[in-house]
């Protein structure tokens, strides 16, 4: 339920339905910590989000097993949290590490990392053409992903660009999302 509320832009409600950490079993502790950290990030509680994501990156051998893609998902979110906290070097290091692995895997989340890297470049006053608009092209190259998933992902990208004041790029992203919805007849 917390995931659904968070994805619908209701982080306070999402946090309210999370169980207490002590009541979460070991097998679900990773997912709990990841969700809580995502809620913190979307709520602007950056230091708490970063602490949670960093804890997940140190997830050890004695902890329940976690897939490589779940670990990459945390790297993507940690890079975004670092960027939001204006910790550009840490964000860039994290984002580049994730980008390399996601590019190799042909994973859709590569677009999210590319937006993070573009935002870092723009914030530094640098050229971001290595990352934007190629971040949108990732959606053309990823096979077997439904247009609805692509549309939601691109809409999230547009919101991030809007929050960063990148109005023209956000408009490009919204147009790309609309194209995904048109393929579904919507």
Image: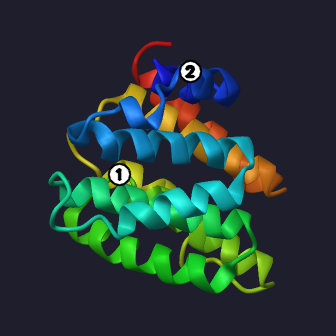
Going by the picture, which residue comes out furthest to the top?
186
Per the image, the residue denoted by label 1 is 108
- Could you give the CA–CA distance between mark 1 and mark 2, rounded to whole angstroms? 22 Å
**Crowdedness of circle 2 by 10 Å Cα count: few (<14), some, many (20+)?**
some
User: In what element is the residue under mark 1?
Assistant: loop
Observer able to see residue 14: yes
Of residue 22 and residue 31, the one placed in the foreground of this image is 22
Residue 6 x, y percent position in the rendering: 57, 29
Dividing the picture into quadrants, the one containing residue 130 is bottom right
* Residue in the image at 72% along x and 50% along y: 45
Give the quadrant of the N terminus.
top left
Q: Which residue is mark 2?
A: 5
The residue depicted at 37 percent of the width and 67 percent of the height is 57
Residue drawn where x is 17% and y is 51% of the image: 64
User: Mark 1 Cα within 10 Å, few/some/many (few <14, many 20+)?
Assistant: many
Using the image as rendered, state which of residue 116 and residue 25 is in the foreground: 25
- Image height check: is 169 above or below 143? below
| Above-or-below relation of 174 to 96 | above
x, y (%) of residue 159?
A: 70, 42
Instruction: Give coordinates of residue 160: x percent, y percent.
Output: 68, 49
In the figure, is residue 122 to the left or right of 72? right
Q: Quadrant of residue 84?
A: bottom right
* N-terminal-most mark, 1 or 2: 2
Q: How many marks?
A: 2
In this orientation, which residue lies closer to the viewer: 32 or 151? 32
């Amino acid at each position: 339920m917390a995931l659904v509320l968070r994805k619908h832009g209701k982080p306070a409600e999402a946090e309210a339905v999370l169980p207490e950490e002590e009541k979460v079993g070991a097998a679900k502790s990773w997912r709990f910590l990841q969700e809580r950290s995502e809620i913190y990030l979307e709520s602007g509680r950056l230091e708490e989000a970063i602490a949670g994501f960093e804890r997940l990156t140190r997830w050890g051998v004695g902890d329940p097993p976690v897939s490589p893609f779940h670990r990459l998902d945390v790297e993507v979110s940690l890079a975004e949290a670092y960027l939001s906290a204006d910790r550009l070097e840490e964000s860039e290091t994290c984002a580049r590490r994730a980008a390399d692995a996601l590019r190799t895997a042909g994973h859709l989340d590569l677009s999210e990392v590319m937006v993070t890297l573009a935002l870092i470049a723009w914030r530094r006053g640098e050229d971001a053409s290595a990352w934007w608009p190629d971040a949108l092209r990732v959606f053309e190259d990823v096979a077997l992903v439904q247009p609805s998933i692509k549309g939601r992902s691109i809409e999230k990208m547009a919101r991030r660009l809007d929050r960063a004041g990148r109005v023209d790029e956000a408009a490009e992203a919204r147009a790309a999302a609309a194209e995904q919805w048109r393929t579904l007849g919507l």
